[in-house]
Amino acid sequence: MKLYNSLTHKTEEFVPNEPGKVKMYTCGPTVYHFAHIGNLRSYIMEDVLEKYMRYVGYDVKRVMNITDVGHLTSDGDTGDDKMLKGAKREHKTVMEIARYYTDAFFEDCKKLNIKIPDVVEPATHCVDEFIKTIQALQEKGFAYEAGGNIYFDTSKLDKYYVFNDFREEDLAVGVREGVEEDTNKRNKADFVLWFTKSKFDDQELKWESPWGIGYPGWHIECSCISMKHLGERLDIHCGGIDNQFPHHTNEIAQSEAFLGHKWCNYWFHVHHLNTDDGKMSKSKGEFLTVSLLQEKGYLPVVYRFFCLQSHYRKSLVFSYENLDNAKTAYDKLIARIAQLMRAKGGAAVDSAAFDSLKAGFTAAMDEDINTSNAVTALYDVFKADTDPATKLALVADFDKVLSLDLAENAEKLVAEQDAAASDIPQEVLDLVEQRKAARAAKDFALADSLRDQISALGYTIRETRQGTEITKN
Ligand SMILES: [Zn+2]
């Protein structure tokens, strides 16, 4: 299986550290607000990656943090504390905000069929680990104290900008959001490991530390939580592309300085979702959440399908028109599966046909998780010259990875169609039977006149490969 690795800028054959096992880490949400659908695109695509790894037989352990402390509004350690800002906005405590939005995040994940990682760890549970790691970094000469805070010294590394060869002067970390630059920093790219001189007088969450009472910086949590549960060598680190710098760059800096060797082999970054007015989280002034899409009548799984129709390394444009197209395609997909269910009979699965169609799906997924081609492989199943039982088995198999509730929603549709059919008056059913007999006898003039009589009673009939469909006008 091939994966694009942001670290090498190449698509590479995936080789785990330990054969058959995958250690995977995901940056979790900062729980100060609802997740917008752009954030959730990342979690959907990471979920597909994880499920595909399991599908091909890897034993996967996946860990995710929950950021409930330390994340400032600018990722470069400036601005306000996001959690504190959320608490003030809603007149609640920081912990109440964290609990509320953590639950909301997992609620959204459930709606979108995103599996919860094996380990989910809030940053506030690991402060001891952060302190120990920061102390070790200080002992190794990678951290310094200035103005009461502890900073990571990026000049001590052979290479700091590991993802891209930035030019220092282009970055202007700390000044890009109009916030004063932190004069304690020895180098522009240095970042805070531990704050003791909080600029927020009302900071609620503080801990004792060797440097005084304070709280951790944002970046240190991912390194520590990952090492706590996955050890010194990580196979895949996932996240949104916006986290590549400075967050992931800083994670690598501190982890490798601490460990003295390479930490993570593959970096999987999901690209942006933009709306047609160029914003990431809003459309026509509305904050785009899963609940909002539901209020507008979309199944959450339709949003998942919309994401899967596109490759994770392409920017995706969200508009209601695009989502409507995905909905239409999804509804058609479900209708085709429902037809297969009606036609299934007792046939056994044709294993040769199954294997060859499955090969189309795995070939797409093996090529850097190309979900767009994997969806095409799903359509190929319908077109294939094989029996409904085999097709249904393939749909169920692919859906272990795609998680689009295909069988469930098709079963619902069949039940709805049956319920609607049971409301059809006997008079209409009798005419349908007479028409069937007329067609069998090749009396097409009679068949047409019976169709007109049925139509006059308010029903339409349609011949499909699976038989006659009756619908109310
Ligand atoms: Zn992270």
Image: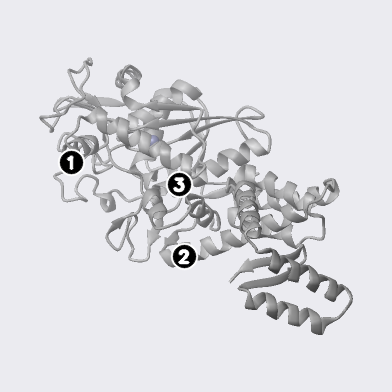
Which residue type does callout 2 highlight?
Asn
Question: Mark 3 or mark 2, which is nearer to you?
Answer: 2
Residue indicated by mark 1: 89
Q: Nearer the viewer, residue 297 or 438?
A: 438
Instruction: Please name the residue shown 63% across and 67% down the image.
Output: 471
Residue indicated by mark 3: 42
Q: Position of residue 270 (x, y in %)?
A: 46, 49
Q: Is residue 263 above or below residue 370?
A: above
Distance CA(mark 1)–CA(mark 2): 33 Å
Which residue type does callout 3 highlight?
Ser
Instruction: Please name the residue shown 12% across and 29% down the image.
Output: 202
Which circle's residue, 1 or 3, is located before the other in the chain? 3
Which circle's residue, 1 or 2, is located before the other in the chain? 1
Question: Mark 1 or mark 3, which is nearer to you?
Answer: 1
Q: Assess disc 3: are there few (<14), some (14-19) or many (≥20) residues with their C-alpha within 10 Å of its C-alpha.
A: many
Quadrant where the C terminus is found in the figure: bottom right
Instruction: Please name the residue shown 26% across and 33% down the image.
Output: 97
Residue indicated by mark 2: 322
